[in-house]
Image (spheres, coloured by chain):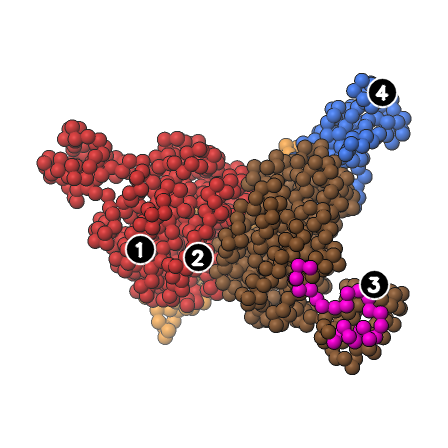
Chain colours: A red, B brown, C blue, D orange
Amino acid sequence: MFRRILIANRGEIALRIIRACHELDIEAICVISEEDRGAAYLDLADRTICIGGPEPRDSYLKSDRIVAAAEVTGADALHPGYGFLAESAAFAEKCRASNIEFIGPSAEAMRLLGDKATARSVAKKAKVPTTPGSEGIITDESELVEIAEKIGYPVIIKASAGGGGRGMRIVRKKSELVTTFKQAEQEAKGAFDSTDLYMEKYIEKPKHVEVQMIADTHGNVVHLGERDCTVQRRYQKLIEESPSPAIDSRTRNNLCAAAVKLTKAADYAGAGTVEFLVDGKGKFYFIEVNTRIQVEHPVSEMTTGIDLIKTQIRVAAGEHLGFSQRAIKPRGHAIECRINAEDPSEDFRPCPGVVTKFRTPGGPGVRVDTYGHDNCRISPRYDSLLAKVIVHQPTREEAIQSMRRCLREFIIEPIHTTLPFLRRVLAHPDFTAGKIDTGFVERTLS
Amino acid sequence: MFRRILIANRGEIALRIIRACHELDIEAICVISEEDRGAAYLDLADRTICIGGPEPRDSYLKSDRIVAAAEVTGADALHPGYGFLAESAAFAEKCRASNIEFIGPSAEAMRLLGDKATARSVAKKAKVPTTPGSEGIITDESELVEIAEKIGYPVIIKASAGGGGRGMRIVRKKSELVTTFKQAEQEAKGAFDSTDLYMEKYIEKPKHVEVQMIADTHGNVVHLGERDCTVQRRYQKLIEESPSPAIDSRTRNNLCAAAVKLTKAADYAGAGTVEFLVDGKGKFYFIEVNTRIQVEHPVSEMTTGIDLIKTQIRVAAGEHLGFSQRAIKPRGHAIECRINAEDPSEDFRPCPGVVTKFRTPGGPGVRVDTYGHDNCRISPRYDSLLAKVIVHQPTREEAIQSMRRCLREFIIEPIHTTLPFLRRVLAHPDFTAGKIDTGFVERTLS
Amino acid sequence: MLDIKKIRELVEMMVTNDLVEISLRDGNEEVNLRRPNTEMAGLPPELLVRPASPNPGSPVPTAPEAPLFPVVEEEDAGLEEICSPMVGTFYSASDPDSDPFVTVGQRVQSGMVVCILEAMKVFNEIKTEVAGTIERILVKNAQSVEYGQPLFLVRPE
Amino acid sequence: MLDIKKIRELVEMMVTNDLVEISLRDGNEEVNLRRPNTEMAGLPPELLVRPASPNPGSPVPTAPEAPLFPVVEEEDAGLEEICSPMVGTFYSASDPDSDPFVTVGQRVQSGMVVCILEAMKVFNEIKTEVAGTIERILVKNAQSVEYGQPLFLVRPE
């Protein structure tokens, strides 16, 4: 097992990793930027080492300095957390080249699944359903019509150079197909100076459901059930829960089985998440893989009782998982709410500053992961995530009641946070009924 | 279901009950003494009502004022917590006579099981093993010898008027019996002016194991497994855990079955605890019943996922338990440590005062029940319990690692607490090996 | 080194003005002064120096959760309070048809009944220990009152 | 030391205006004043008034876990620091057999190499931008240093 781990991250996830290290009797060293000097969560680290200025590009993204910090502090492993360099295969290789184990999958697996296109082909090979569409650019009208017929309407035409919603057009019937395609071509020409377009099946009112995977280097692959992350805003997850209220047990089994197949196909070791879109009929389509621990990992920890960070560290050290799929028996219902330092009434504009009053909720089944405290300072330079509240109860109804209670108890002053917004979601009948899709927030609460 | 509950208690258990009420959409009103005015935990109550002066006898023990407070605030139920009036059958009757439901068992059940002697006879009728001994006073020598032979050596001779260790003598072989008995008679005469003596089997190096019971008013009785409370000092529990490391599954099943039999025999409804002594061979003997919620109830909540306070409230309102014995599947291992404002180096003398710095631990599987916070005041007038740390992990080894980590993270300044003492226990090989008895603390750490 | 006289001055300022902390820095010079024991979840410091058993008459600080408590304003300075010795319901008269025991402006002698408090169906006559003139009645008829709650303000003679 | 009269004014301002806290900084002068009601997490008050981006030269509050940081003492006032621009291992000489680049009392011109920092097997020559006399060397040979850590104190000319 490792003797000393360098944590190449900050805030709540750095604190989370420190605690995991200490329960394994491993020293935890935090790299910090000058901005984070004196932050309270660092009191729990065995040592800190400053690697650069406040801007991420000068510190938390400076791979050379981070590896140098691991070397001078004598760390034998490095945990990247999420964000920053967590999904950089090059960084993983750089660490391992310096005999510092990168706590994550192999660089090969990261490259294979990190890229959407290659991940999609791995999925196809593994017989994991993907969104049907034109493989690549559409060259002529006959091909266009032919593919549309094959995959069925509605379809969505996307500009290769587009993204984030730009350069997309939905076609609901054949009669509109060709004209819409021509308009899209014009638009793409103007916007991106490229007429390259491709086409995919358009999934109506989808739900976002992901599967938490954990695998060791001895071929043992186990899933910890799914998480429903349908409550999002501009692709930013706001609330996650498990089990998903949107799928039945058959869909659940197929979804998890598909995730296992994909993970095995990529010869993947470590913690990872396979993300799917699920349509109204329970049909699911692979989107992408996150080759790292995720913000919402506590949801699965609550239902399964497995500590994902400790397990990540163990398997990175070459140990066996120590539990089989049959040993995983999810219990009850868990919900996580992300409390961000953002103003929901001002289009979720970040609200950094000093928190003078910080009162966290507590009680049975309640977990709060946060670096916050009275008079803590929230930097404008980093992620606005201030706290995660996770509740665990026997049923979804009780979990919602418990979360409402926690959101009422939580006091953060004087800055704006997403607390009022989250209270509205937890009180909304569509949410409590579990009848929402990824458009819920924009449609209903914006 | 109730609309408004009056909480006739203070500190961490009052806060615990407030949270349970709010998850059931019930208003929570706290009675307070003048001493507790402005305590931070009261911020979460929907209302407080002052009932008297700082001394418990002037407030938290004043049953008339508490009932009057329930009346003037329009509460339809009252939760007594633990301590104070929680085990007073007369108080329960007084509440119900005023149409305020006392959240606890019937007064009859409280009287039946609250008194050691009657509880013992109920146990015998229910075929629950009790410590064998002379039923009542020993009148002559022949009876003495005869009973000693029957129950087997070692035996303990106790003065009826004695208690708390005074007037007790252990006899290990027959040859010593009569002489020791005569000495005990002399001693009792001098000390208590009474020669009344009785005799019991002496249980060597016992473990304290109790079973958490919960029952509704419709005859459904369920146990939530056992708790091992062997780490005690002068009959004060310091650490509790579940499952017990001291008993095998056969003993566990018999123990829990016995507790269920006793609970049913007493026609008991609500939460309660049946306490046993377990000897080195796994033989167990009934001691007493606690007819209330206990300080250490979170241990069972962690392993079973059942909220005991919410369930207490539900069954007091006449609802069915809603779960069967088969539905209860304890998971993993939970340990609770009591952080008291006491100085272990000064014979656990209470250390009231103002806590200027209060940092609680956190992370997966960690729960902290406390009314403490930065600059909170600990009154010299009440119980010294400041916080309870509960950890939940897949195995006992991991739970111990997690608790060690939490006890290191926990910072309470400047007053003395039991934290240093608890750290010593968690580091002691006898504790980690689970090889201790109720004499462990006095023998090893005092 | 720092000038001790200045620090003494700072400490005096803290005590007289009831500050909890002063921290100063000038280049490498730094002063951190902090008074413990105060700062209790928004509780006025009086509570910390409260006598072991305060007499109910003295104005006790109220928690924000105690909505029953009236604010005793400045012009009330010099007046004495008649406080509730129990938890119950306040009645200004012996029965709905009778006149109230006392009205504003009325003179009262010590030992005179000023109201009735009902608790658990028992009606308790409350007598004043203060002699003087009733300046204000702080609670309404049939209102529930808690222990130690001021009921009347009296200008003593 | 700060002007005591100014502070008294501040305190009076707090009391009369019922403020709960005052935090001021002027250059490296800093004042924090608080009155009861807020609960502090006991963090260094500097945190409350930390400039958006402190320059590495000025003494920034350091976490207790940053043991690499030396205390810059009083007599060092007026001296300038040469700080580490990177994370690495400090070497005072080009190789074990050579003399150190600089010694205490030595005069240095701007642009002169003062030490070598090794990071990831790469040896980086560190040059001084300050011209003056080396007053103190704050780190030992082969010691690991972090970003922004003062290495030398120089008395500028």
Q: Secondary structure at mark 1?
A: helix
Q: Is residue B321 above or below residue A308?
A: above
Q: Over which residues does the magenta segment extend?
A: B125-149
The amino acid at mark 2 is: Ile
Q: Chain of mark 1?
A: A
Q: Secondary structure at mark 2?
A: loop
Residue A306's label in the rendered image is 2
| Label 2 to label 3: alpha-carbon separation | 53 Å
Q: Chain of mark 2?
A: A
* Residue at the disc numbered 3: B161
Where residue A420 appears, x then y in whole percent?
48, 35
Overall secondary structure of the magenta section: loop
Is residue D10 something one can see in this rendering? no
Name the N-terminal-most of marks 1 and 2.
1
Where residue A112 appears, x then y in whole percent?
25, 55
Residue drawn at the location 42% of the way across and 51% of the way down: A300
Q: Chain of mark 3?
A: B
Where residue A377 appears, x then y in whole percent?
49, 45
Is residue B391 something one can see in this rendering? yes
Left or right of residue C40, residue A363 in this image: left
* Residue at the disc numbered 1: A260
Looking at the rendered image, the disc whose residue lies closer to the viewer, 4 or 1, is 1
Q: Chain of mark 4?
A: C
Q: Nearer the viewer, residue A5 or B65?
A: B65
Q: Is residue B435 above or below residue B241?
A: below
* Residue at the disc numbered 4: C106
Q: Secondary structure at mark 4?
A: loop
- Quadrant in which the C terminus of chain D is drawn: bottom left
Q: Nearer the viewer, residue D34 or C103?
A: C103
The amino acid at mark 1 is: Val
Looking at the rendered image, the disc whose residue lies closer to the viewer, 3 or 4, is 3
